[in-house]
Image (cartoon, rainbow, N blue to C red):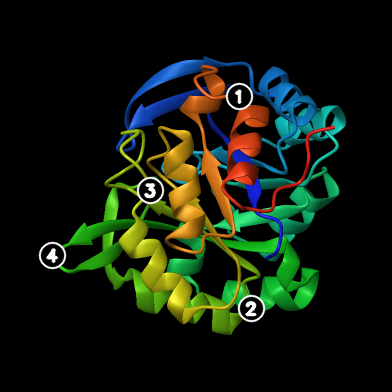
Amino acid sequence: MLTKRIIPCLDIKNGRTVKGVNFKGLRDAGDPVELAKRYSEEGADELVFLDITATLEKRKTLVDLVKRIAAEINIPFTVGGGIKSVEEIEELLKSGADKVSLNSSIVKNPDLINKASDTFGAQAIVAAVDAKRHDSSWNVYIKGGTEDTGLDAIEWMQEVEKRGAGEILLTSMDRDGTKSGFDVELLKKVNELVKIPVIASGGAGSVQHCIDAVKLADADAVLAASIFHFKEIEIKDLKDKMRQSGIEVRPVE
């Protein structure tokens, strides 16, 4: 078994870390630079930074903030939010990001995945998918979860893999911020059909939820926000319990 990753997520709005439920009702969770530094020191495997209103506000991700965070951490760092071109990806990678997360822009222009993957390598390109259940299937949502594209999420994830994405960041909008557990059914379906790593996002509320995402749905990584921001679960404790359940994780030094 490959080592499974624990990834805290910083949702950024107006330069602050925020957290909501089902993409709404945002509350302040602290300074992103301080949080990033803390997570790097506490044994997180990677960090994800999402400028959650960049697309809606039609502006670029906060390059200065990316530089400030990159200077404080020594773990891989993924940045997303409002990224629309190969030039913008290059600017973020030069500013200290290791990977970029693309969502709304690749739904509107799927060729951007091919171009970005060819230019920077698949390992630098993460396809972020915000999925919401519609009866027995899931639809892809864009613009920070405000617009239903009508695209079938499972089919879309197979397409992003074919086009050269190196990883999928899959958020269940139904579970986001609810702490009711990851959408194991959705994760399982996707992992049966794609070979690239899938990061489980949306719904982490307990250690068991994280174990279930890996053991029942074959997630390659678990991403969470509020349980880490508000210290409900410590990364070291989570890793210890995952290891005890037979999951390979990178030790906390």
Picture quadrant of residue 208: top left
Q: Closer to the N terminus: mark 4 or mark 3?
A: 4
Cα distance, mark 2 to mark 1?
Answer: 34 Å
Please name the residue that numbered disc 3 is placed on: 182
Residue 234 got which mark? 1
Instruction: Give x and y (percent) for residue 45.
Output: 73, 43
Circle 3 Cα neighbour tier, 10 Å, few/some/many (<14 / 14–19 / ≥20): many
Q: Is mark 2 on a helix, strand or loop?
A: loop
The residue lying at 55 percent from left, 18 percent from top is: 231
Picture quadrant of residue 130: bottom left
Instruction: Give x and y (percent) for residue 89.
Output: 71, 57
Instruction: Give x and y (percent) for residue 63.
Output: 72, 37
**Quick check: 137 above or below 50?**
below
The residue lying at 85 percent from left, 49 percent from top is: 94
Q: Nearer the viewer, mark 4 or mark 1?
A: 1
Residue 146 got which mark? none
Q: Which amino acid does label 4 sit on?
A: Asp
Q: What residue type is labelled 3?
A: Phe
Please name the residue that numbered disc 2 is placed on: 164
Cα distance, mark 2 to mark 3?
Answer: 26 Å
